[in-house]
Amino acid sequence: MITKLKSYDPSNGELVGEVDVTSIDDIASIVEKAHTAQKEWGALSVNERIEYIGKAGKALSERAQELGKLLSREMGKDISRGNGEVYSCASDAVYRAKEVQEAIKTQFFRGGRRETQMQYNPLGVCAIIAPWNYPMSMAHWMIIPALTAGNTVVFKPSEETPLIAQAYVETFNKVLPDGVLQIVHGAEEQGKALVLADVNLIGFTGSRPVGKDIMRNAAGTLKRLVMELGGKDPLIVMNDADIRQAAYFAVANSLENAGQMCIATERIYVDEKVADEFEKELVNIAGQYKVGAWNDIHADVGPIINDKQRSIILSHIEDAIDKGARVLLGGKDHPGRYILPTVLADIKPDMLIANEETFGPVICISRYKDIDEAVKSANNSDFGLGASVYGGDQAEEVANRLEAGMVGINQGVGGIGDTPWVGAKQSGFGYHGSPDGHRQFTQVRVVTKRG
């Protein structure tokens, strides 16, 4: 029986550290402890809970450089991005909590002699299951709303990045009352046991197959679900687009975090009238990207998280080449643990890389003759997380035809302010962020009285 979960630096395979694997037999008692703690935590005012969260954010800020280095070493992203992820979580803890506070205020409705209150009360215990690619922020974005709303949290991080998750929880727990935030370490067995335990909500970010498995296991007791299940994001480049700007975005959004990002651009459809110019510009930009370890100041693209994921990416590249894709950059001779920035053109619908989430530093280009064809191709996916359009006067019209939860016009999908992180089709079930997203971590209660 495995009792230790070892974490390795994906750039060189060196051991970074280890944590104790949580026994399956202990998960029920962990959840029971969370229920007990929730009674007092939920009885606090929202302002009191925010005061705790503010102190936790300050404690995180004080360790930011130390934890940024740990995050980068464990996951593989460069140190500036590792530091940035930690600092962003530390700095937005109170800000995010206050957004939640505003969203869950009791609403009042009056008519005649009657008054109705619509209350947003705690659900109880939330299980948060987070991925390895943004191992702190993806968990933090759900943990803060859950805690602010008066719930307690049991956090199951990816087995690939247990150390930074442990450090996050330990830092918060220097401030939070006992039992409010707990952690469960392990792999599939522990995740399944947590889903089957007496939790009230499951917040999950990860793959679609795992999401479907969670839905099946949660169905028995109709647990609440908030899930983001990946994407296969398209980019449409119209013939009146700023080609250089579009190419810069395509490269940056395809290669960010070595392509290990749910909103990475994985499919590009470019008008054949400007395709040659676009491909030339894109290859010139992508050719300047270098691979390297988290502490290599010259590196733009880090290692792939593990051999399994690297094999998937390589299989997609090889399948595409075998079926006629043109290699414009990279494609072969990848150093161990890395995938060279790769640009493939003439992608066809029967290729694996056109349909399955690649999650690697590969840029895939297809040409189209008319915009209806491009929209049809972009929508021809079970995924629908994000999408982007680069173009002129008609770009917004095209954007509104795309089947995605988040769409960018001449930019990526990031919204202004407290807008939701939301997917369409099989990329999402529920969502977080925005007032409606924050309220998913609550139980609505309608109370009506006659005066």
Image (cartoon, rainbow, N blue to C red):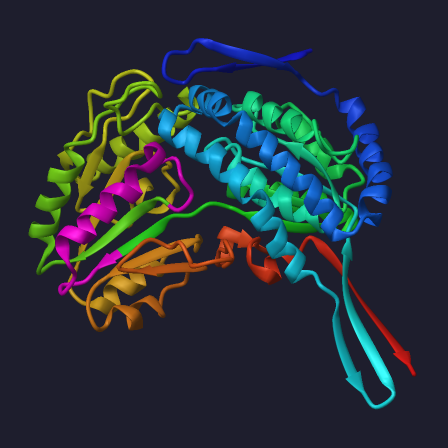
Q: Please tell me whether residue 76 is drawn above or below residue 135 in the rendered image.
A: above
Q: Quadrant of residue 261?
A: top left
Asked if residue 350 lies in the magenta stretch, the reply is no
* Viewer-side residue, 10 vs 81: 81
* Viewer-side residue, 38 vs 376: 38
Q: What range is drawn magenta here? A: 236-263
Name the outermost residue toward the bottom.
112
Residue 5 as seen in the image, left or right of residue 380: right
Q: Residue at x 26, y 33 (%)?
A: 317
Name the outermost residue toward the right.
451
Q: Position of residue 114 (x, y in %)?
A: 86, 84
Q: Quadrant of residue 403?
A: bottom left
* Viewer-side residue, 107 vs 310: 107
Q: Residue at x 26, y 24 (%)?
A: 299
Q: Please tell me whether residue 438 is drawn above or below residue 217 in the rendered image.
A: below
Q: Which residue is drawn at 8% across and 44% down?
A: 280
Name the outermost residue toward the top.
14
Give the quarter of the figure containing the C terminus: bottom right
Q: Where is residue 442 in the image (x, y as percent from the top left)?
A: 73, 56
* Viewer-side residue, 312 vs 130: 130
Q: Residue at x 64, y 55 (%)?
A: 100
Residue 228 as seen in the image, left or right of residue 404: right
Residue 176 as seen in the image, left or right of residue 66: right
Give the quarter of the figure containing the N terminus: top right
For the stretch drawn in magenta, what is the main secondary structure? helix
The reply to whether residue 231 is visible in this rendering is yes
Asked if residue 249 lies in the magenta stretch, the reply is yes
Q: Quadrant of residue 105?
A: bottom right
